Amino acid sequence: MRSEHTKDLQPEELEELKEKVAGMDEDALTEFRNGFNPDEMGFCGEEGATE
């Protein structure tokens, strides 16, 4: 499932981002995570469960 941050990324861009994050040390990963606006971190699409 895509997030608000990744919803517009092309598959190649998403794979590049995954590789970049996988190669980060703990400090770089913390800095990366803290760089997001919490209000823009939800899932992309409809909210709530459907029955």
Image (spheres, rainbow, N blue to C red):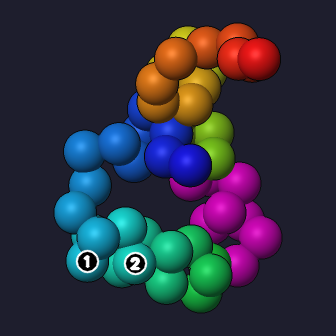
Mark 1 residue element:
helix
Q: In the rendered structure, does residue 50 fall within the stretch colored magenta? A: no
- Residue 12's tag is 1
Mark 1, Cα crowd under 10 Å, few <14 / some 14-19 / many 20+, is few
In the picture of the structure, the residue carrying the numbered disc 2 is: 15
Amino acid of disc 2: Glu
Task: Indicate left or right for 26 with 12 as reference.
Answer: right
Q: Is residue 34 above or below residue 21?
A: above
Q: Position of residue 31 (x, y in %)?
A: 61, 52
Q: Position of residue 15 (x, y in %)?
A: 40, 78
- The residue lying furthest to the front in this view is 51
Query: Disc 2 to disc 1, how far (Cα)?
Result: 5 Å
- One can see residue 40 in this view: yes
Q: Which residues are magenta?
A: 25-32
Task: Indicate left or right for 13 with 37 as reference.
Answer: left
Contact, mark 2 vs mark 1 (Cβ under 8 Å): yes
